Amino acid sequence: MRICIALQVGFESFLLVDDETTAVLEALRVAPWMRGYGVAGVIQTFCLDTLRSDHPKVKRVRLTRAENPPAALLTKYKVINSKAVVPILLPAGQLESTLKLLESRVKNLEKSQNLSLLEQEEVLKFFEESKIREDLLPGGLLVQGWLPLTTCRSNLDILLQRKIVWMYSHPGDSSASSSKDTTSCGGPNAYLEGFLSLSTPPFPVPLAERIHRLDIDLFGNDPSCAKVHILQQVKIRVPALPAGSGIICVLYADETLRTELDQLREGLTPFPIVREQMILEMEI
């Protein structure tokens, strides 16, 4: 359930998740001419009062922010997780050549793991295994884009409506893999928990001609698997792009992968964006 409270000078939107026990703050906006007058605080207070009165099951508020959140925010919320944010720009007219360059940087894979595309029922079964959640999801959170969720069934139902491509690299057990779509990845430091990635369909970037944005969420810390997942996710999404389009590919990954991902995009056109995604939570 989504709650949107709008005033003439601003609005705030929440999404009820975790079987309606958590409210995820999706957006808070104040008109430019009213900023600096405490309007945001008034809206937030009103929204929290509304949650308490109309949705008594809600016990916490969760949100995502870029790095360096205001000190006042940290007095109310605690940081429960963070991820590195790494953008890669594949310019219009250079998409094919840039993909070939990236692919040339993913080689000499010393260990083989099966990579599967998970169908809806496979996704649900995947998250029934508590060990997988513990290994791949710090704090038990599945963060898709900027939406932080636990893996309860109602949350998975939300994600399964979003045309996400789910990829999983099995930890060496070929019997667990899907026979429909497989490739291989691995590395000298492969971890037993496997590797998971999610991507949603690319969407047009406002005010940027022939550019679409593709978000890829990475779960795991094997750099070789991370690179293979990125390439495979991009290759799946490229055919759906309008002719002559480019991609801003935004990667969300474990901080330990930042150096390897920076090397993957070395020499490509820089694209400024935030460096860190932070997940904050507050009990109410």
Image (cartoon, grey):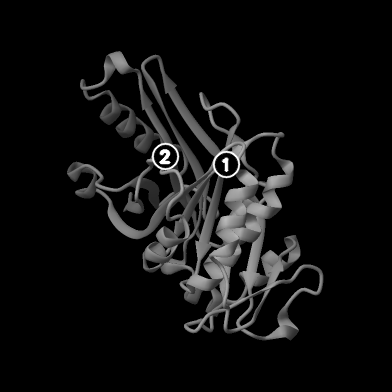
Q: Are marks 2 and 1 in contact (CB under 8 Å)?
A: no
Q: Nearer the viewer, residue 142 or 84?
A: 84
Residue type highlighted by circle 2: Leu
Is the residue marked by circle 1 packed among few (<14), some (14-19), or many (20+) residues within 10 Å? Answer: many
Q: Is residue 241 above or below residue 219?
A: above
Q: Which mark is residue 247?
A: 1
Split into 4 quadrants, where in the image is the N terminus? top right
Report whether residue 197 is seen.
no
> What residue do we see at 58% from left, 72% from top?
107
Horizontal relation, residue 215 to residue 237: left or right: left
Q: Residue furthest right?
A: 180
Counting from the top left corner in percent of width and height, residue 174 is at 72, 84
Front residue of 232/132: it is 232
Where in the figure is residue 220, as x and y percent of width and height?
49, 70
Q: 10 Å neighbourhood of mark 2: few (<14), some, or many (≥20)?
A: many
Q: Residue at x 42, y 61 (%)?
A: 263
How far separated are the C-alphas under marks 2 and 1? 39 Å
Pick the front one: 102 or 277:
102
> Residue 19's spot in the image, x, y percent?
55, 54
**Which residue is depicted at the point 22% across and 49% down?**
74
Q: Is residue 60 left or right of residue 218?
A: left
User: Is residue 87 shown above or below 259?
Assistant: above
The amino acid marked with disc number 1 is: Ile
Q: 262 or 70: which is nearer to us?
A: 262
Q: Up-down: is 28 above or below 97?
A: above
What mark, if any, has residue 51 been given in the picture?
Answer: 2
Quick one: SS at disc 1?
strand
How many numbered marks does the figure carry? 2
